[in-house]
Image (cartoon, coloured by chain):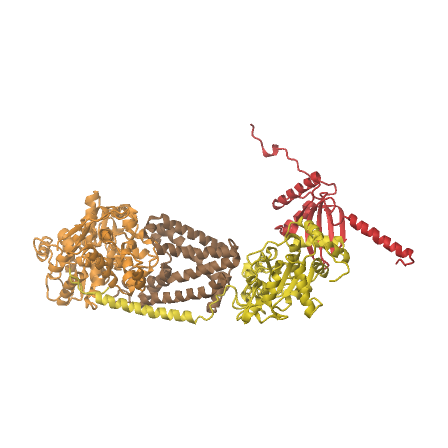
Chain colours: A orange, B brown, C red, D yellow
Amino acid sequence: MSAQSVNTATIGSVRAMPADVQGDLNDQVRVERAMQSFAMDYGAMTALRLESCIHCGICADACHFYIATEDPQYTPVLKVEPFKQAYKREAGPFAFFFKLFGLKRRVTTGELGNWQHLLFDSCNMCGRCSLICPMGIDVSALIEQARRSMFDAGLAPAELYAKAKHQEQTGQPESSAEPYREKLQAIGKQHRVEIPMDKPQAEVMLCVPRTDIEHYPKAVAALARVMQHLSVACTFRSEGLVAENYGYYAGGRDWQRQISLKLIEQALACHAKMLVVPECGHAYTALRWEAAELYGKPLPFRVLHVTEYLAEQLDAGKLKLRRADSGAVTFHDPCQLVRKGGVMQAPRRLMQALGLDLHELENNRAFSYCCGGGGGVLDIKRAAPLRYRAMESKLREVDDTGAGTFLTSCSDCRATFDDAKAHFNWDKSPHSLLELVADNLG
Amino acid sequence: MELLEFARGPALKVALAVFCFGVSWRLVGTILLRYHRHLSVPRVGFFKSAMLGLLVGGSRSWPHPQFIKRTGYGEALGYSYHIGLFIVILFFAPHVLFIKSLFGVSWPVLSSSIITIIAVLTFTLLLAVLFRRLTYSVLRKLSNFDDYFSWFVTTLVIVTGLMATAHFGARYETLMAWHILSFDLLLIWYPFGKLMHAFYIFPSRMINGYFLARKGAPS
Amino acid sequence: MSARRLSDISVRVEGGASKTSSATGTIGGGLIAIMREIAEMLERLALYDEPGSIDLRTLPFSPTDYQSLREALGNGEVEITLNVDGISRLRETGYAGVWWVEHRNPEDELVADLLEIIQIPEIVVTENDEIARSASRLRERLSIHTAGGIIQ
Amino acid sequence: MTTAKRLETIEDVLTANGVSRRTFLKFCITTASFMALAPSMSSVIAKELLKARRPSVIYLSFQECTGCLESLTRSYTPSIENMIFNMISLDYDDTLMAAAGKASEDALATAIKENYGHYLMVVDGSVPLGNGGVYNTQAGKSAVQILTDSAKGAAAIVCVGTCSSFGGIPFANPNPTGAVPISEIIKDKPIINVSGCPPIPAVITSTLVHYVTLGIPALDAHHRPLAFYGNTIHDRCYRRPFFDEGKFAKSFDDEGARNGWCLYELGCKGPTTYNACATVKWNEGTSFPIESGHPCLGCSEPNFWDRNGSFYAPLAAGLIGSVEPIGEAAGVGAAVGIAAAAVSRLRSRSKAKPHETEKQTSKEE
């Protein structure tokens, strides 16, 4: 299965984008398969969302890709428009008519690349459009579904596909010189903290973002240190270590399920009462909200984001914090946690306990703009120029707070901001809230 | 048979039948699709989430303050012509009588001069809406036949209605016939285009509101 | 050209045409058109002896307009009442040659309301044929009298 | 109408009847004003009328109730309307004439012969065509036969009343006699329809005056004189302000009815009825139906008996009769919707097979 690229012709005024393809299928078959996958994989809720759209265009005003470029092709609901047509033709109540009279035009193979560009490169699945839609359509849910159809047709971006596949097969999204298990132990040694690993029994099971292992080892150590401070029976499991889920990004549902299962099985194996998701936004969505659906039954343990867990411990009086000496700080709400996950107060509770002088961003909490890297966009190389454009206003918002310290609670967001820092020579560094907590344990 | 009789009689009957047939087909055909049990443990219980969901049915009519700066104009335009349409449809005496003849219920009406002013305003707003659809790049790219045709049938009813009240362009009964025929056309088109949003808007908002609420996310 | 103030422009307000006229009221916007028409008709009458008339019931007049027209035209010296299949009232207005003519049916309802621009409305004038007929009728009666009839 | 000296011109008639010149002039002035003609036309009318040869008029009655003729003869200003009868030479009218039987048949034949090509034909009543026209016969001749025979030599036809103009009540559903209006039979003569059930007498006479003096008046789409049928009752109705304010009587005995509010809700057909009732009124200008508290029936309009569902159904009401078929349509729609959903569900299950590239089994949302 080689990753290929098809160059597509210019469509209308829109610059045609090259598409990554998987498998050996002709384009027409791919189109058919994408459409069918979408049309056949829906329920009443999806139908309701598709039927409701009145083409008011208001969702464009929520999307940082549109706002930055003013290019109408980035209108969120337009990204699923071909699929909406497919639904109408294949599965809607009037499918018969549409088919009979050929009312809904089939999507051409020439547009494949554009879809990939629109659904993957220029959508963080941040869900801001779902909050603005006057018809109450959850546009990001439709995009998630469209991504799955693209995957089914072998039309996922090469980077996401490769990482998802790697993770499904090996448990980690890419190969590393030494296994993550050993890397973790090395981090523990370096930061003089014990990394609990493969304990047969634990109240709390931990996992770790690959991003942290590779780029922010201090955050890994911080997690271990905080858990140690709380003296809770906890453990990492070497068979279910990585928090991320590239299956979710790439749209490979089965892979997403397999990857989630690794963690679920390990949590069951160590009889964990809860699974604490580290500072990783989409891992939270995948585990907290989607894992049970893919698993087929409710999970027999709680799934909490680390900030949620720590806020709970704080309220229970178990977590003691010193006042941090950080001056004015500002905080970026990761979309998957706040807008799509409901984790809104926990990080603020922690920052309050740390006595931080929090200067909120202009658009905060549920209205926070995405960092631009979510939904796997950070991993798609060709998407970088567009991503930089889309995040400029976000960086400006951070600057406008005048805060010296910039915090967040998602390592992907953090990596995206670090990448931007290098690109723009930005004078700020994103910091981990967890690290700040670990540094100020009372 | 005169045109007016045709419009009020057989044409109206067929249009109403098509409307009821099409609307129930489309609604039932959507509602009876598969439902998935949501297995993740909700952050907010079912009852409270459902209540919050119901609330979103109304609260989405007013944009979140964070969005108003960008969406205010478009939303004000959109909602105001809807309000105009509702007033004209529901509070013009002949319309109330029409509704009474179908359903047997009636209510107080507004004076014709007020209705005429509102109808003219609504028509102006509809023109502005079309202008925006044609000039705003997002809308132009998004729009298809459904959007323009639905605009057309809606505006046609307003225009013929205004012509009939102003006795402009033809004899009154001819204008009335056009007005009713254009309404018949709207009824027939209704189930097949985006005009159906009148039926979908509240369930759609409420369901989105419910799903956000059960995750504890703002809606 | 030096700038002038509005008050510098000499304006002469034209009064009524007749001494007995009460037509000193100002003429309001909607009335100007009809007053112009009357003036034109008067000129034609004077120059070419060509009478004219205006049917007041066909004009889109409000009662106020109507009243204003009445005041603007005023009353003249002549008022004639005819008893012809109901009462007809003909009044010369403050403008000589402009007659306000009202015809009423036997039920005293207004059936025609006109302005006639003429020396004497046609309906008043007795025509030669009629005069001749009167003469012959009178003669006839006299002959009956001379034949011994009784004049009552 | 047999005087020693034949009265050739209208002036002869006027002189003979002692109608003064002023009376005549006043009549001409009021007629011109009434027909919305320029006032200067009154002298034209006067001049033309005086000169005019008294036109021969043949008045035929078919399927009718004589209400129209009653209306005409009971008109409120006898002197003037009588004058009309004096201005025309009514050579045949089987209702008014003294002659009967053979004499009356001869009168018709003579009138047609003497004025062939010049006489005016006035018709009231519709003409039955069913079963060969047997439903209306006179002296063994069917109405349609009499009409076509008489119309051949007519200069023009004035249809008085809704029956002759548009078919009227005989034409109403189920129309057992196959009645039709005159215009359905006579296609090659100018026709003036003076509709109404009955028409306003002054409208009939003024139309005749216009014909005699100035020829055929301006007509609307239904061949009615525009001067009288140019506006709807609604447009000229004194209750119109209540319509505009949205004040309606809801029943015949409610506060609204007592206050004289608009009768639209009680089924008034004023908005679609073209006639002069609201301005000319009836019974010596006393009143008209709306003024006496009853909605307009729309009697001067084609098909008035059937076209609005009911005299008491508001104009805005739909004419859809039973709503059951519409309910059934909704039911059938729901059934089709169920089928469509079922087909979609089946299709989605059968299509949910593993793909060749990667195994994709799970299909939950």
How many labels sit on residues? 0
**In the image: residue C135, left or right of residue D336:** right
Quarter of the N terminus of chain D within the rendering? bottom right
Image vertical order of residue A380 relative to residue D133, above or below: above
Give percent across and percent down for residue A83: 27, 58
Among the 4 quarters of the image, the one containing residue A219: bottom left
Taking the spot 20% from the left edge, 68% from the top edge, the residue there is A296
Name of the residue lying farthest toward the top: C1
- The front one of C72 and B60 is C72
Left or right of D110, for residue D173: left
Q: Which residue is drawn at 49% across and 65% down?
A: D317
Residue C143 place in picture, x, y as percent:
89, 55
**Closer to the camera, A37 or A136?**
A37
Q: Quadrant of the C terminus of chain D?
A: bottom left
Determine which quarter of the picture holds residue D168. Answer: bottom right
Q: Is residue D230 left or right of residue D329?
A: right
